[in-house]
Amino acid sequence: MYHRTRPSYPRAVLDFLKQHAPGIDACDVGAGTGIFTSLLVESGFAVTAVEPNQSMRQAGDWTGAKLVVAGTAEHTTCASRSFDLITAAQAFHWFDIDAAVAEMHRIGRPGAVCAAVWNDRSNEPGYDGELPSLNADVNALLREFSLEFRGARRVNETIELLKQRIPHGERVEFPNEQEVTRDGIIDNFWARS
C-alpha cells in the first residue's frame, strides 16, 4: 500500500544530493518500501537500504538497492565509514534522534552528507478557497483516534531537534505535488505517519 499511495519526491532533491555528496555510496535508513531508495538508485547512487520491518523490506525488493539489511537508524549493522550519503526519507520522526545522529556519524565517511527528507503536507484551504483542507481534516482524525500517529513527532518538531544537534545543518525546501485519486484517498489515509 505504501508505494502505491505515498508521494514520490521531487527531482530537485536528488539533484541537490548528487551535487553535494562526495561520492556514490549511499545508505537509505528507514527505507520502508523503497520509494526514496529507488530514486537514489536511478540517480546513480550505490544504495544500501536499512529497514527493521521485514514486510517493508520484502515490499522494497523492486528498488535496485545493492544491499537491503535488517537494521535500525540507531543500529544500522553497517560498517563504520562506509557511506558518502546517508538519507532518511519520511522516517526521521520515528528515530531516537541522539542515537540515530551518532550512528550516522559512525557510518559516514569524512565529508559525508546526511539528509532527513520529508514530504510535508499542506494544510491550506482546498482548491476553491473555501473547503477545509482534506489534509487538515485527516490529520485531526488521526490525532483523535490513532495512538501511533499521536505519538510520532511532527516534521517541524523533529527539524528543531535536529537543528539543536547539528547547528551547521541546512534546511532546503523544494515544491512537490501528489495527485490522489478518489480510490487512493483511503489507502493514503492508512499509510500516513
Image (cartoon, helix red, strand yellow):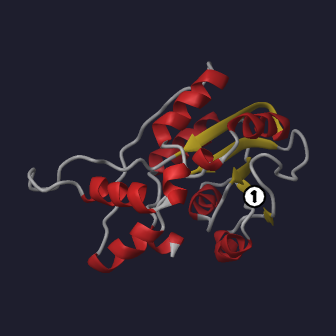
- Whether residue 165 sits left or right of residue 156 in the image: it is right
| Relative image position of residue 60 (x, y in whole percent) | 66, 71
Task: Classify residue 7 as left or right of residue 21.
Answer: left
Q: 193 and 83: which one is in front?
A: 193
Residue carrying label 1: 50
Q: Give the percent coordinates (x, y) of residue 124.
A: 23, 46
Determine whether, in the image, residue 180 is placed left or right of residue 160: left
Res 32 → quadrant? bottom right
Q: Quadrant of residue 64?
A: bottom right
Is residue 161 placed above or below 18 in the rendered structure? Answer: above
Residue shown at 55%/37% (left/top)?
Answer: 158
Q: Nearer the viewer, residue 105 or 99?
A: 99
Task: Name which residue lies at 71% across and 70% down.
Answer: 57
x then y, percent, for residue 58: 70, 76
The crowding category of the residue bearing disc 1, from other C-alpha atoms within 10 Å (few below 14, some 14 to 19, many at least 20), is many
Q: Is residue 11 above or below residue 96?
A: below
Say which quarter of the image contains residue 33.
Answer: bottom right
Res. 166 visible in picture: no
- The residue sitting at 17% across, 54% down in the picture is 132
Which residue appears farthest toward the bottom when viewing the image? Answer: 183
> Is residue 126 visible in the rendered structure shown here?
yes
Q: Residue furthest top?
A: 167
Q: Amino acid at mark 1?
A: Val
Task: Label 1, secondary structure: give it.
Answer: strand
Q: Residue lying farthest right? A: 79
